[in-house]
Image (cartoon, helix red, strand yellow):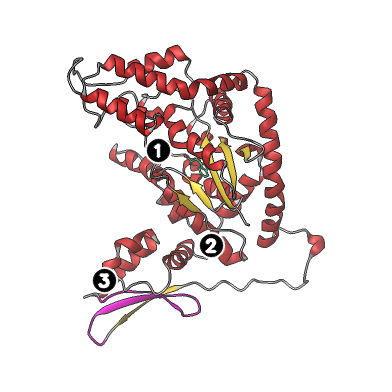
Amino acid sequence: MRSTRFLTGITTSGTPHLGNYVGSVRPSVRASLAADVESYYFLADYHALIKVDEPGRIQRSTLEIAASWLAAGLDPDRVTFYRQSDVPEIPELTWLLTCVTGKGVLNRAHAYKAAVDKNLVADQDPDMDVTAGLFMYPVLMGADILMFNAHKVPVGRDQIQHIEMARDMANSFNHRYGEHFVPPQAVIEESVATLPGLDGRKMSKSYDNTIPLFAPREQLKKLIAGIKTDSRTPGEPKDTEGSALFQIYQAFASEDESQTLRKAYADGIAWGDAKQILFERVDREIAPMREAYLDFINNPAKIEGILMNGAAKARSRATPFMAELRHAVGLRRLSDMTGTAPQKAAKAALPSFKQYREADGQFRFKLVDAQGQLLLQSLGFASPKQAGQTIATLQRDGAAALTRLTDQLEPLAVDADTVGAALALLASGT
Ligand code: TRP
């Protein structure tokens, strides 16, 4: 049976916290144990360079994150666990993908746009403090994924756009050079809760409200004691709704245990006692891993060995695949020249929009592929300008616009992916 390839990256820019554990480490380790899956987990240290310019911090974070995953039960014999920067084929592929990605597509990436918008609001030059690394980030991420032809990419909601871009890159490349890439799909874990932090907002380094995953017992206790609660006194019934303490407890406890705490809330448990219960419950799950974690942290050479093996495993796939891709685009040995005459590849024909006016006086447009097959057909517009605006929206936003524009379009003649691929192709201007 052919297995499904899962792949996910973890940026090495900080110390793992309980939110990372609940949202990413724990579900990924569990998923990696399933049959019929092939998992790729990697330390995204090239990505870290976009955000962090302290070399020591990148190195330390790489150690801490690797140790956390291993301590949480990731089995390096079962999965491919590697450090991005040990696979030089990834930056090499980044360049090939850069050359099939429309600049306009990258202009619309959320992280880059947010940086530009922030400058505009502050009346600054739009590109102030925006590196080309931030701009190119989606292409590097596309290379991470396409290098191993991953089918499924488990990510948080904020990353969906990047997976869509990787799909577009796969389609654009395949269109020009033949079928080499599998367009990947994002997997969003709906059931995995976002953990609140000490102040009740989402646990995140940027809010400085985190509980480090492997804080020593005493520090864990102190941090949990600092979780924000309301001012209700012992004996007063308490709300589980909106209680960060309760939500964190739920992420660790069984259904029965949560039920018991819910009842204790209703019976007016003192906040101090509830915190003690939370502390004991979290520590019960973390303590055995903490020991393994400390062993790893104190033995960086052992982790280095594991990562080196992982890199070798990753490259046993990446190296031959990269050779195939180099050949596909024309980066070839001259000794295996196939013909002497200059060969100009037939310029791949593009899909196109066609506007027209019907007998009813309404203006319409359709999108047809290079062979003239109908991909998309609009409903009637009162003016050609309105039809043109909808075309512009489709050109700008690609597949993402389809669902928003259903009231202006006929039901799709072909599946949405095909239409999306055609729009992406137009955007990249093959
Ligand atoms: N950008 C991702 C994040 O910030 C990390 C990442 C890098 C990643 N490359 C990836 C995730 C490839 C999935 C697949 O969370």
Examine the rendered structure and indicate whether residue 56 appears above or below residue 84. above
In the image, is 78 to the left or to the right of 269?
right
| Amino acid under disc 3 | Lys
**How many numbered discs?**
3
Cα–Cα gap, marks 1 and 3: 36 Å
Q: Amino acid at mark 2?
A: Ser
Residue 56 in the image, given as x and y percentages of width and height? 56, 23
**Helix, strand, or loop for circle 2?**
helix
Q: Which residue is mark 3?
A: 385
* Residue 367 covered by magenta stretch: yes
Q: Earlier in the sequence, mark 3 or mark 2?
A: 2
User: Which residue is labeled 1 in the image?
Assistant: 128
Mark 1 vs 2, N-terminal side: 1
Q: What's drawn in magenta, residue-wise?
A: 359-380
* Place of residue 385 in the rendered image (x, y in percent of width and height, measured from the top left): 26, 71
Q: Secondary structure at mark 1?
A: loop
